[in-house]
Image (cartoon, helix red, strand yellow):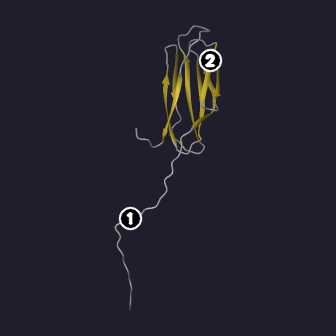
Amino acid sequence: MLGVSSAAWSETVSIKGRVSTGDMESIFSYARVVGQVGEGKPHVELLGHGRAIAVEVTHAEPGMSADIEYGVRNIGSVPVRVTTTIVNASDTVTMVSYPPAGVIDGNGGQGRGRFTIKVNDAAKDGKYNLGGTVLVFSQWNAVR
């Protein structure tokens, strides 16, 4: 029996790989009123090619509430998680937000959320501004 072998030593290690980055970009795909209690006429529409939702309620009586459902589509490549922040809340009109649950995958992934607007003690036909809900999109695995 005969065997031949060879060995060599090197102090450098080479690893070849590829690193890719992605982008985060999400838009609203739809918004609609899905429930209402009390007197008033809620109207919703998408603005800026899905970058914002406008809500207007006319002829609202105290106690009126409207549930608005919305869809979010992730047109970026990085999966995202959605949280919400309510700005300019008041005692006259209040808002509660229920953001999409879980992770919304990239490249067309979708999620669904909703928010409720309630008119508390408001004068009939009064005009009140409520800043609204700000959706915060973060990378799905971001350290908190």
Secondary structure type for disc 2: strand
**Image quadrant in which you'd find residue 41:** top right
The type of residue carrying mark 1 is Val
Residue 128 at x, y percent in the picture: 56, 13
The type of residue carrying mark 2 is Val
Secondary structure type for disc 1: loop
Q: Nearest the camera: 25 or 109?
A: 25
Image quadrant for the N terminus?
bottom left
User: For the residues marked 1 and 2, what is the alpha-carbon distance in whole angstroms?
Assistant: 66 Å
Q: Of label 1 and label 2, which has the lower sequence position?
A: 1
* Residue 119 vertical placement versus 136 (above, below): above
How many residues crowd mark 1 within 10 Å: few (<14), some (14–19), many (20+)? few
Residue 129 at x, y percent in the picture: 56, 16
Residue 116 at x, y percent in the picture: 55, 24
Query: Dot 1 corresponds to which residue?
Result: 13
User: Mark 1 and 2 residues: CB-CB less than 8 Å, in contact?
Assistant: no
Residue 142 at x, y percent in the picture: 44, 41
**Image quadrant in which you'd find residue 31:** top right
* Residue 71 vertical placement versus 116 (above, below): below
Rendered image: mark on residue 124:
none
Q: Which of labels 1 and 2 is toward the front?
A: 1
Q: Nearest the camera: 125 or 5?
A: 5
Image quadrant for the C terminus?
top left
Q: Is residue 36 left or right of residue 13?
A: right
How many residues crowd mark 2 within 10 Å: few (<14), some (14–19), many (20+)? some
Rendered image: mark on residue 57:
2
Q: Nearest the camera: 112 or 79?
A: 79
Q: Is residue 7 left or right of residue 87?
A: left
